[in-house]
Amino acid sequence: MSLLQVAILAVLQGLAELLPVSSSAHVVVAEKLMGLDPSSPPLTLLLVMLHTGTMFAVIVYFFSRWRAAYFQTVTDFKLFAWHIVLATALTGLIGEGLIKLLERTALRGSPHADIEDLFSHLEWIAPALALAGFLILIADILTRRRSSLREDNLTTRQATIIGLVQGLSLPFRGFSRSGSTISAGMLAGTPKLRAESFSFALAVVLTPPVVARELMRLIQNQTLGGVGAVAPAVLSSLLGAVLSFLAGLIALKWLSHWLEGGRWYLFGTYCLCAAAAVATLHHIGY
């Protein structure tokens, strides 16, 4: 994998990760178009390191908003922490449960069943993109029909719904994490900006264990030939993380502008178009 390929994937990841259009799906398609194997351990590590870059972009972009919303009083912080823990636990429960189920069904018979083996299958990505698109469109339509909502704290019910929906994004590439969680929050009655802030706070909590898991998978994978083969993959992934950080800051400004400006539905429309494009690529042999 060349540095140019890493740069292309990093910029694509940074732009798409924080927009509700599924960066994973876009990166997987780009990898296949470049002749790379999206399910290989080095590329899997690169993908999660690109997520790390965008995670730091999220922290930089949202820090002042989080401080104003969640860190003004001890009560606000305790409520925020409880909702983060609850939503993250539900995400892990649903996500890991689905991963184990898929490994024992869709991957049944494989000598070393691993959910990452499904990441290169465009026939799985296309319907996931379409589902995310429909969810975004439904959330936008129903939110427009409601009266204006006050910018108050999330309820435990809303945090529960967001956490459960986020769990679906773990095994299914194409089911946008940010798109699904923000939309789920909106459908549950959460104001747009509050749903956005909480969604990306969850992303910051979720990313480190995912990165650690993929790093261990990379080291333990026998096809890499030991620790000596890990270093190049890690270095190129770190470069990608820096580039995805810069692109992520641009994407966050774009997302907030469209969310606040009533153009959320455009992301859903894009997901549906992307789903059709991915399905076409699968049909012609990619």
Image (cartoon, helix red, strand yellow):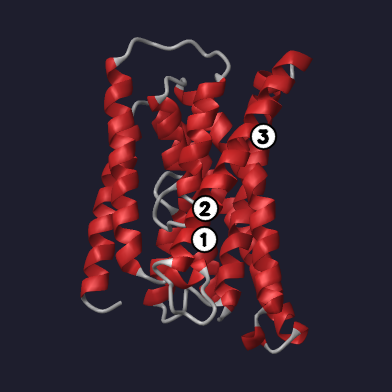
Circles 1 and 2, Cβ within 8 Å, touching? The answer is yes
Report whether 74 appears left or right of 12: right
**What residue is disc 2 on?**
97
> Eyeballing the image, is 228 above or below 12?
below
Which marked residue is nearer to the observer: mark 2 or mark 3?
2
Helix, strand or loop under label 1: helix
Q: Earlier in the sequence, mark 2 or mark 3?
A: 3
Say which quadrant the N terminus sits in. Answer: bottom right
What amino acid is at disc 2?
Gly
On the image, numbered disc 3 is attached to which residue?
85
Q: Amino acid at mark 1?
A: Lys
Q: CA distance from mark 1 to mark 3?
A: 22 Å
Three-letter amino acid code of the residue under disc 3:
Val
Spot occupied by residue 18 in the image (x, y as percentages of width and height)? 50, 46
Q: Residue at x 71, y 85 (%)?
A: 229
Residue extending farthest bottom: 225
Q: Secondary structure at mark 3?
A: helix
Q: Residue at x 37, y 75 (%)?
A: 33
Quarter of the rendering occupied by the C terminus:
bottom left
Label 2: which secondary element: helix
Determine whether 44 is above or below 99 in the image: below
Q: Nearer the viewer, residue 6 or 99?
A: 99
Q: Could you classify mark 1 by the number of other residues whose Cα lies within 10 Å: few (under 14), some (14-19), or many (20 or more)? A: some
- Which sits earlier in the primary sequence, circle 1 or circle 3? 3
Query: CB of mark 1 within 8 Å of CB of mark 3?
Result: no
For disc 3, the neighbor class at 10 Å (few under 14, some 14 to 19, many from 20) is some
Residue wearing tag 1:
100
Q: Position of residue 231 (x, y in %)?
A: 74, 78
